[in-house]
Image: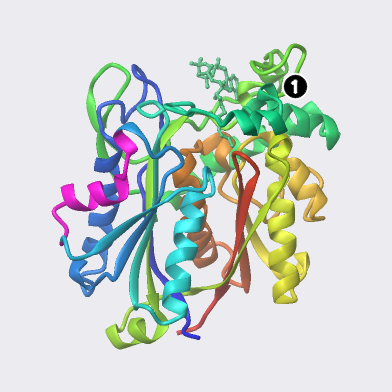
Amino acid sequence: MKECVIIDGVRSANARAHKDKGWFRNVRPEDLLVKVYEALFERNPKVKPEDVDSVFCGTANQAGMQNDIARIAWLVGGFPESVAANGVGQQCCSGMAATEHAARAIMCGEGDIYIASGVEDMQKVPMMFAIDISPKLLDRYKFEDIPMGATAEKVAELWKVDRVDMENMAYWSNKKAAAARDAGKFAQEIIPIEGEQEDGTKFMVDRDQWIRDNISMEQMATMKSPFKENGVVTAALSSPLTAGAAAVLLMSRDKADELGLNYHLKYVHGAMAGCDPTVMGIGPIAAARKLLDRTGLTVKDIGVWELNEAFGSQSLAVIRDLGIAENAPFDNVNVWGGALALGHPLGESGLRIIVTLNDIMKTDFTDAKYGVAMLCGGFGNANASLWQKVEK
Ligand SMILES: CC(C)(COP(=O)(O)OP(=O)(O)OC[C@H]1O[C@@H](n2cnc3c(N)ncnc32)[C@H](O)[C@@H]1OP(=O)(O)O)[C@@H](O)C(=O)NCCC(=O)NCCS
């Protein structure tokens, strides 16, 4: 089999998905995607759009403005019609699934150069947009148990995740994200894109909008759950509604060497797993275990973890169940903060955590041999992917 390496990874800033306050409220999601594709070619001039075998793009809700957004973004960007673009739908796991599809195509020798991407604008295409749930699904699961917030409450209860521990995690997620932003860590991955401030002033959006610099344990303790009476999952313990796009340029190692390109991570393995949709957040436990079992690795072998923080409850349940750590701040999990602070544009996040993992292993965790990115998805899908440092 061929080896698949990451040549580059970029993303838009993650902006609030809000019709009056979101910095990208007047930018369509396909235009965000075009900007990240353009950035990949500008940053890697040896690779031309026509050299790409095909493009994969994950989007959770492929309806409205996001209907076949993979192909439409490619076309509106003026890229060659001869390059195919494939939409990948696996709810929040879509962006990671897109990456795995591309990596596997490279490894089995179908092609040498692929783009994997992910995009979502949760204001312009809200979570329940145009959804018509199968009545047969509702024979199997109660309707009220399926929404994401309900699943997060159930995980908190069944996995006995204490609210204060979740608030501590949210606190550290925001603090770590703010520290990474202030240290310029995200500058290598965020492509500035024009948006507008809350007051309408245009500016180049080069930072994530949701990070709460003034987060406080006292303030969080006063918040109520929007999902359940006397529940524990508050807005601070939920990934907020977000808009964003991300993309990676993947290549066979042979091709990268032929073109004289740099790389430092290769894709090793991906594992998808399913679980009860009413506790969908615990899915990464099974996906990560499958990944480790199949590769003969243990939790201790993994130097860096990127786990999408869909909710505080499921994140802590996963981190504890896998035996990675007990409580935040974690040494090697979400080193630059997680979705509780950075936001979670559904189909983008699986891609975003791979982009960030790549950068963390390039700059801060240079001795780590392996990194894992993993996330849960609506209706009980989960995905984990293993990346290994390679010397050129
Ligand atoms: C939880 C949720 C319903 C809240 O949505 P919302 O009502 O639009 O609320 P906001 O995110 O604007 O936050 C509401 C208020 O909570 C407060 N708040 C949120 N996080 C806070 C924090 N960390 N500290 C203090 N206050 C906080 C703020 O007052 C905020 O309003 P403001 O920033 O405008 O002053 C929404 O974010 C949500 O559904 N998240 C989950 C999304 C999801 O399911 N994703 C898929 C996962 S698999």
Task: Answer yes or no: is residue 182 visible.
Answer: no
Q: Residue at x 64, y 15 (%)?
A: 226
Q: Is residue 196 found left or right of 219 in the rendered image?
A: left
Q: Residue at x 73, y 35 (%)?
A: 313
Task: Answer yes or no: is residue 68 visible.
Answer: yes
Q: Is residue 185 found left or right of 374 in the rendered image?
A: left
Q: Secondary structure at mark 1?
A: loop
Q: Residue at x 62, y 74 (%)?
A: 369
* Closer to us: 25 or 138: 138
Q: Residue at x 68, y 38 (%)?
A: 277
Q: What residue is disc 1 on?
A: 232
> In the rendered structure, does residue 72 fall within the stretch colored magenta?
yes
Question: What's under tag 1, amino acid-wise?
Answer: Val
Q: Quadrant location of residue 239?
A: top right
x then y, percent, for residue 150: 69, 25
Tell me the quadrant of ligand 1.
top right
Give the vertical position of 50 relative to 234 (above or below): below
Q: Quadrant location of residue 244?
A: top left
> In the rendered structure, does residue 12 fall within the stretch colored magenta?
no
Q: Is residue 63 found left or right of 279 in the rendered image?
A: left
x then y, percent, for residue 17: 41, 27
Magenta stretch, residue numbers: 65-80
Q: Residues within 10 Å of mark 1 (few under 14, many from 20)?
A: many
* Closer to us: 93 or 302: 93
* Closer to us: 4 or 371: 4
Give the vertical position of 169 relative to 77 (above or below): above
x then y, percent, for residue 207: 39, 39
